[in-house]
Amino acid sequence: MKPILIVDDSLFARMMIRRCLSVTSLSGRDIIEAANGQEALDILDRTDISLVVADLNMPVLDGWSLLRRIRTSPRLRHVPVIVVSSLINDESRADLYRIGASSVLGKPLSPKAMIAACFALEAA
């Protein structure tokens, strides 16, 4: 099985995302972590990933730019991206879906929200 990539500049947030993923149907998959969007792109260049879970507000390359780069890459555009951020409002949610987010979740993240997002990915 292909691993999951968690992208967040906060070690605590990555740990919480990892915990929430552990109660989903995706539990048991290997998880790779990146602290910013550029690290994520470097990983995506060399590794087949099944899912990206990314924050928006990060140094070097933010989540918005990461999502755009994934969606414009012929090799990566099929990879689902779940955005997890404390910066979510109705306008940003609509914009994120418009540019290709598979799901948009607010922080603090709950296991219930992650389960629903993963279920929606499997149903699609």
Image (cartoon, grey):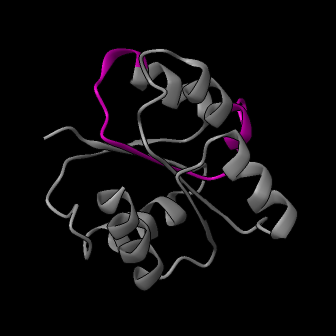
Q: Position of residue 101 (x, y in %)?
A: 59, 48
Number of callouts in the render?
0
Give the left or right position of residue 9, taking residue 46 as reference: right
Image quadrant where residue 49 sits: top left
Assess whether residue 100 is covered by the magenta stretch.
no
Name the residue furthest front.
124
Up the image or down, 95 lies above or below 22; here it is above
The residue that appears at 39% across and 65% down in the rendered structure is 120
The residue that appears at 48% across and 82% down in the rendered structure is 110
Q: Nearer the viewer, residue 6 or 69?
A: 69
Q: Position of residue 78 (x, y in %)?
A: 42, 32
Residue 103 visible in the snapshot: yes
The residue that appears at 53% across and 17% down in the rendered structure is 73
Q: Position of residue 42 (x, y in %)?
A: 47, 19
Name the residue furthest right.
91
Q: Quadrant of the N terminus?
A: top left
Up the image or down, 11 lies above or below 12; here it is above
Q: Position of residue 14 (x, y in %)?
A: 47, 59
The residue that appears at 41% across and 24% down in the rendered structure is 44
Q: Nearer the viewer, residue 12 or 71?
A: 71
Residue 57 visible in the snapshot: no
Residue interval drawn in magenta: 45-65
Q: Nearer the viewer, residue 105 or 37?
A: 105
Q: Quadrant of the C terminus?
A: bottom left
Give the left or right position of residue 117, taking residue 1 as reference: right
Image quadrant where residue 21 sits: bottom left
Give the left or right position of residue 31, taking residue 100 as reference: left
